[in-house]
Image (tube, rainbow, N blue to C red):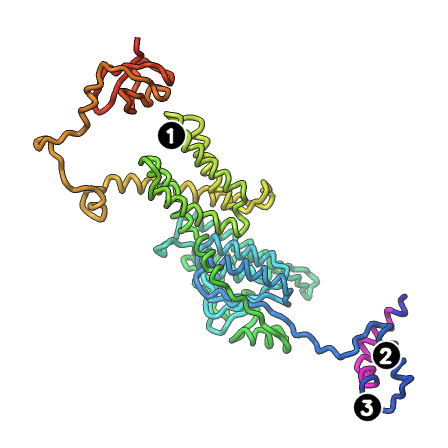
Amino acid sequence: MHFCAYSKIKIRNQYKFRIYSLLLGKNSTNMKQKALLFFLFLFFGLPLSAESPKKTIFYQIEIQDEINSTSWRHVQQAFSKAAEIRPEAILIHLNTYGGELLYADSIRTKLLHSPFPVYVFVDNNAASAGALISLAADRIYMRSGASIGAATVVDGNGEQVPDKYQSYMRGIMRATAKAQGQDTIVSTAGDTVFKWRRDPQIAEAMVDDRIVIPNLIDSGRILTFDTQEAIKHGFCDGIAESMDEVITKLLGTKDYEIVHYKPTAIDGIMGFLTGTVLRGILIMLIIGGIYFELQSPGIGFPLAVAIAAAVLYFAPLYLDGLAANWEILLFVVGLILLAVEIFVLPGFGVAGISGIVLMVGGLVLSLVGNVAFNFDGVEVGGVSRAVITVLSSMILTVSAGLYISSRIGHKGMFRRVALEAEQNLEEGYIGVPTEQRTLIGKAGVARTDLRPSGKVIVEGEVYDAVSEDGFIEQDSKIVVNRYETGQIYVGRLK
């Protein structure tokens, strides 16, 4: 067995092309020799035709814009497609000034757990979130004149956010640098020294201007490296002017092929719909549409808005595998319970509270990567972000509703939302209808339970009423006692 295996390897590696020439070439080899060679091909499993050596495959991803939900979507899809062709390495062509930390952190995690080597080529800029992504790569290559660093967390106006967020960014920058491991250095004296391939303290200095590193950065400055400085301090593995130069000059590969990830229009739409800001807006439309629909009789425009927003909210999450069937069902059941509480059960009790809890739960859980009640891979930070996203959107919805209500009819953009005409008392207008005063003393039937409010039927008409005798069961006989401030007050008919 060992001899056969050895002979097979030997023939393939040392005599393969010689056998091809004898079998296929025009020489003095007789028919018996050719028959023997043909038997060797069959016995040892050698091909009858020469195989051309395969090219080395590299898979390239472009990150040329702001880091956002669309970038994260593209990276996810690119890694899935790369897994099908199993390239030599994944190349990321990076040129960005930063973006949203949430999605940069997700991309960083994807790179750190990649089954293939990941190499980043910084084409001019790897600032802020781009620096975090670069640190997660196995190797960093930079164009001459490029820069990397300045990873301080800022708000939409470019101002630094509180230290709570800076501390988190320092932590993930430090952890990402450490993830690249250490080099073992043995000195001439025989001492063993462990040196980080990428210094975690330098990574932190890219975030915090209070960190001082002697002979490198003073207090009050955010650290940013140019290409030469990055090479000197271990944050760049080589200089190249193009991706082809990275492969040929720095990786030493001559015969290669680059497969480019090409995002589709669907990827762009899905990435847009899963954006943090749009997600919040959709939640506001869902909650706001349901609220205004419940305030008005019948089915109208607010409900249509809520349904459309719910579809746009859940559809991309469902297609991405984040929102499971049972999570969407939670939201629907919560909506039904809330409607039952309002239209069937007067007052506000268990059904209404349960409905709100289930609706919020469905919105939150759909943002968390769990399927079939399996929460093993769910991080606490992901749950916290989902809860904050949903609750903050609900708070903003209530606040916006109160503000708009206070501005309706006044000067500004909400002036024309309400009628501008005034109906003064001097002109004969009244604030409440008076025809219901004629019902005083008349008998009727409780259409619903009165606890104490509910509905009654008097002379064939349905009216809202309040019981003055406490709880009155449905179908009990009642009498109208009085009418004040637009409200009918009833009691039991004795």
Q: Which residue does the numbered mark 3 point to in the structure image?
A: 26
In the image, residue 51 sits, relative to residue 374, either above or below, namely below
Give whichever of 38, 397 is nearer the camera.
Answer: 38
Say few, some or many: other residues with alpha carbon within 10 Å of mark 1 (under 14 / 14 to 19 / 20 or more). Answer: few
Q: Secondary structure at mark 2?
A: helix
- The question of residue 325 being in magenta is answered with no
Residue 4: % across, % down: 89, 70
Q: Secondary structure at mark 3?
A: loop
Residue 323: % across, % down: 52, 46
Give whichever of 219, 406 is nearer the camera.
Answer: 406
Magenta segment main secondary structure: helix
Q: Amino acid at mark 2?
A: Phe
Q: Which residue does the numbered mark 1 point to in the structure image?
A: 343
Residue 302, by quadrant, is: top left
Q: Which residue does the numbered mark 2 point to in the structure image?
A: 38
Residue 74: % across, % down: 51, 60
Q: CA distance from mark 1 to mark 3?
A: 95 Å
In the image, residue 21 sits, relative to residue 286, either above or below, namely below
Which of labels 1 and 2 is toward the front? Answer: 1
